Image: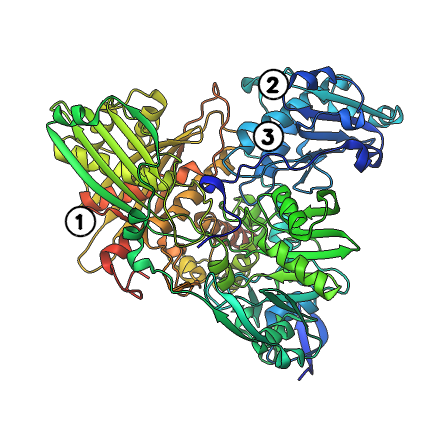
Amino acid sequence: MNFRIEPERYELREGPAYDFSFDRRGFFKALGGGIVVVSLITRAEAQESGGGRARGRSMPQEIAAWLHIDQNGAVTVYTGKVEVGQNARTNITQAAAEELGAPVSAIEVVMGDTDRVPYDMGTFGSMTTPQMVPQIRKASAAARAMLPPGAWSSIDFASIAKQGTLLQAVTGDAKPKATSSWTVMGTSVPKVHGRDFVTGKHRYAADVKLPGMLYGRVLRPARFDATLGSLDKTAAEKVPGATIVQDGDFAGVVAPTPHAAAAALNALKAQWKSQPQTSSKTLFADLERNSAPESRSTHESGSIDQGLSAASHKLEADYTVAYIAHAPLEPRAAVAQWDADKLTVWTGTQRPFGVQSELAQAFHIPEQNVHVMMPDTGSGYGGKHTGEAAIEAARLAKGAGKPVKLVWTREEEFTWAYFRPAGVIKVRSGVDAEGRLTAWEFHNYNSGTSGIHTLYDVANQKIVFHASKYPLRQGSYRGLAATANHFAREVHMDELAAAAGIEPLEFRLRNLKDDRFKAVLHAAADRFGWGRRKPAAGTGFGIAGGFEKGSYVAACAEVQISPGQAPRVVRVVESFECGAVINPDQLRNQVEGSIIQGLGGALFEAIDFEDGKILNPRFSRYRVPRFQDVPQLDVVLVDRKDLPSAGAGETPIVTVAPAIANAIFAAGGQRLRAMPLVRSRINPTTSGGTAR
Amino acid sequence: MARNLELLVNGVQHSISAEPARTLLTVLRDELDLTGTKYGCGEGQCGACTVMIDGIATRSCQTGLSAAAGHKITTIEGLEQQGSLDPLQQAFLDVDAMQCAYCAPGMIMSGAALLAKNHNPTEAEIIQAMQGNMCRCGTYPRIVAAVRLAAAKSRRSVA
């Protein structure tokens, strides 16, 4: 099947589509007097305008962020990054407060509003911390330099603002504070706007309400790739207040209440035409069979054959990873409002400017006619890169001539969003008599390239990604393919250690040169008591380590097994190093959350599908981690103040599954090579087993 | 057909004209604009829509309007008293028991209902009471800690 919107290698990386112009927006006029600092991405001509005045279209487009300080000393930071629960808002607030010497309460961050913030590709790939935070720090440091010395409270902001707008553009040469003198960064500032969330005041996209707004529902095809044969609207049109909107294969309803909209939707009688489609039962064979031959060797060195001939232990094994869903607790939602040919949309997305482009294309209007606003959103995990709900709400609003709110049902979210790619990984390896790797051949079919490279020291390597024809719409997910690749690699390393008769931690250390990797392995092992504690009968310890997106992680798991029962994860210790820690408590929160979310994919999450339908599109049939699934957790943060900060929302998820799989084996269980582990063990073919 | 119903929400009496089969969730959100109560699944599996009815944690997406009429309904917006947060709301802030926080209102309602009848729940009792509430960000340990903290603070303030 072919979907129109498909992220390249599962992460969207489009170039800027928006031709930003200060003049067109009259933006700075609207701000009023005070200090404005624009943070520019380094470029030769950008430097020329440093300290100068905005010159309309001649202003460079490479703007990362800007901030404004008004006559009361209120600071507003503008960034295209968004908040989806990873606490970017808090980290950016800390960065500005630190460099300005301002209290956290003086800072407000405007995020993801396409009329008010500079273009940004999107919030993914753990880039906010390594890329955006330094830009904010740079702009804030420059703003501080424009202010008189002394305490924030002593500054006469009113007289500064009377001078009009003092505009400065800064490039890479601004000097932010040294890590050693941080007083706000590096501390556990609580979540910004926390009170609005615990009181229910915060308005997520689905909570936006406009005067005269109607509620929409979209008619979904009976199967993927189905086309509309016929549509009988007679009964639906009789539902009081309902309007039917149809445009080719797209059909939907709007009504004054969600109840009436649902009634009208149910009254639509559609005939769909579709071709037979494949099933999850044959997924892995299909992915391998339908792959491109030797599509792209991402890395090759030495000779696998020579490496294998030098080995005293050789091993070959296949690993599989199922399709899983992000299942963000807030399903996709959008409110759309037209004013002639201008469109305003509130929606939860990780790419507001991407959604702006999608909308402009869908309706053949210029991008500057599309205003996308992104209220802090009920999570994404890589699952909200696209603008389906926004486009649908806008289509319904256009057809109805009124503002429309569209909230996807859970079933729609499970069916019409996209999934973490399934994959098959085939590994062939060899190890010599001293327990050193001699050969490492690694083929990933479909799941992706993130984390595909090994940090273990092996001269003879061949690492290949094979693109494949895939049966479900697939895209980004927290950590992308790093989870699949770490699962295969770290379970395989465990198998090699067992084959060579070497203790698993020792085996890893023997094959590592990277000190940061070694440090996280030691940190997790020490806290866990690895090598000092003996597992009880029926209990096993497993270890796994990894590196991705600039940060290092290691996990130790304790798992208890008993015949006929699902394995119980008793304890997980995870160490994490992402350079200098910006907010220890929230980092801990992210790592804990990654481990717990990782338990789902490790143990029981899998999407079942057949003939163009998702068979388990609801929480009663798709199990995710709950309170009772949470093991004893211990997070060890390795704070490297000497290193730049890396993102932390993704990488801590990658070692969860292999550590558990290795612990199950150590407990005397089977060697499990399929994610999810428990389901494949308890009930490999049918649904509805005890593990679900 | 639409009927007139009386709903007592957060101490305020509301006259609603709506189909009795409508869920309490959509009436709270769309008629009364009490959007702190969230839709998450529509099948009573996730707990995002939890409110208290006569003090009992209830899934508003599974509650028909006629079943709710005549009872005392409390939503997340009704917990704060004269600008002062409920101890569990404060505890959520104190231990940062949230990430995206979409689950937080439902979690707080389930936890507050538990604390109202059990002032000193064990960890196992908290987990059992909250098992029907889902947090996809995985902040469960912090939520348990928040419930315990709120219980401890309430005990101290009573003593």
Q: Chain of mark 2?
A: A
The answer to whether residue A406 shows anywhere in this view is yes
What is the three-letter code of the residue carrying label 2? Lys
Identity of the amino acid at label 3? Met
Q: In terms of secondary structure, where does tag 2 sit?
A: loop
In the rendered view, tell whether residue B87 sits above or below residue B132.
above
Along the line of sight, which residue is nearer the eye, A169 or A467?
Answer: A467
- Using the image, name the chain to which the residue with label 3 belongs: A
Q: Residues within 10 Å of mark 1 (few under 14, many from 20)?
A: few
The residue at which mark 2 appears reads as A177
Q: Is residue A457 above or below residue B41?
A: above
Q: Can you tell which mark lies on residue A396?
A: none
A319 or A274: nearer the viewer: A274
Taking A348 as reference, is A567 left or right?
A: left
Q: Residues within 10 Å of mark 2 (few under 14, many from 20)?
A: few
User: Disc 2 or disc 1, which is closer to the eye?
Assistant: 1
| Residue A670: mark in rendering | 1
Q: Dot 3, crowdedness within 10 Å: few (<14), some or many (≥20)? A: many
> In this rendering, which labeled residue sits more in front, label 2 or label 3?
3
User: Mark 2 and 3 residues: CB-CB less than 8 Å, in contact?
Assistant: no
Q: Position of residue A322 (x, y in %)?
A: 34, 51
Asked where in the image residue A408 lies, by quadrant, the reply is bottom right
Q: Which residue is mark 3?
A: A132
Q: Is residue B132 above or below residue A644?
A: below
Residue B103 image point, x, y percent = 53, 55
Q: Amino acid at mark 1?
A: Gln
Give the image location of residue A318, x and y in percent: 23, 43
Element on which disc 1 rests: loop
